Image (tube, rainbow, N blue to C red):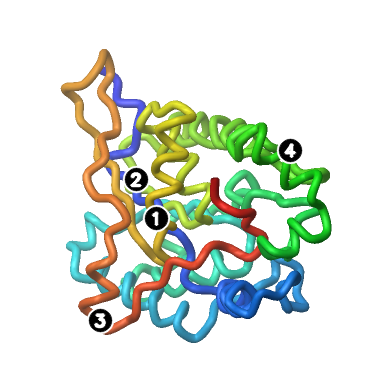
Amino acid sequence: MEQKWPEVLWIVRHGQSAGNVARDHAESAGLPLIDIAERDVDVPLSDLGRQQAQALGDWFKALPMEQRPNVVLCSPYVRARQTAQLVLEAAGVDREDVSWVVDERLREKEFGLLDRLTRHGIRLKYPELSEQRRHVGKFYFRPPGGESWCDVILRLRSLLETVVREYRRERVLVVAHQVVVNCLRYLLERMDEAQILDVDRQADVPNCGLTRYAFDPTLGRNGRLVLRELNFVSPLRQAGAPVTAEPDVPAAPKS
């Protein structure tokens, strides 16, 4: 049997960002627009987000060296790259000792015209889009200039092809964003629209929450990755870092 998957695949949402904080404030205050000056790609971690990333890195450090990540695939967004760097530093993994790839296919879902708008702001400024989204459903709805969940899934299919081709038998850490985490779950766990939207409705992905897949050679013709841990946040709690799960800045309302 030829193994095509990594030995282990960890998928992590970035630590809390300044955008998460700004969005939470705007939503609670009933404001139409999230007050943040940077492009979404440039939004950094908050102080708490840095603490969360370091706590996760401390957890990795407790593993034997041969069980820590040796491949890092990271979104190009600042908050994701900062998270990955802090995790590796705290884990005692030298960046020169891992394959580090910033991959634009792991970028946040693009919200186009709805970028930086709160739920209230979307209903106020673009009521027709709010109604269209309600009719089509968030899985297929594509805002002008933005992406649907299907668009994100399409680029992630390409990413997984790269993982299968280049990182078989490796220990791969992916650092990305909430929608990306859920869409990777959709692909790896072979979900359908109803299943992934149910996952999304149940709870937001925690900042620095860890989802782990391990290779099982007994499944299928060539083995498969199997979910072993989901949104694991014990490392944060053990380090005294508060667990946060705010949606990302431009997130549209939940169904």
The CA distance from mark 2 to mark 1 is 22 Å
Q: Tell me the element at label 3.
A: loop
- Quarter the N terminus occupies: top left
The CA distance from mark 1 to mark 3 is 23 Å
- Return the residue at label 3: 239
- Return the residue at label 1: 203
Residue 55's image quarter? bottom left
In the image, which is nearer the foreground, mark 2 or mark 1?
1
The numbered dot on residue 9 is 2
User: Which callout, 2 or 1, points at the residue further toward the start of the chain?
Assistant: 2
Q: Are marks 2 and 1 in contact (CB under 8 Å)?
A: no
User: Which callout, 4 or 1, points at the residue further toward the start of the chain?
Assistant: 4
Residue 205's image quarter? bottom left
Amino acid of disc 3: Ala
In the image, which is nearer the foreground, mark 2 or mark 4?
4
The numbered dot on residue 132 is 4
In the image, which is nearer the foreground, mark 2 or mark 3?
3
The numbered dot on residue 158 is none
Q: Residue at x 70, y 64 (%)?
A: 120
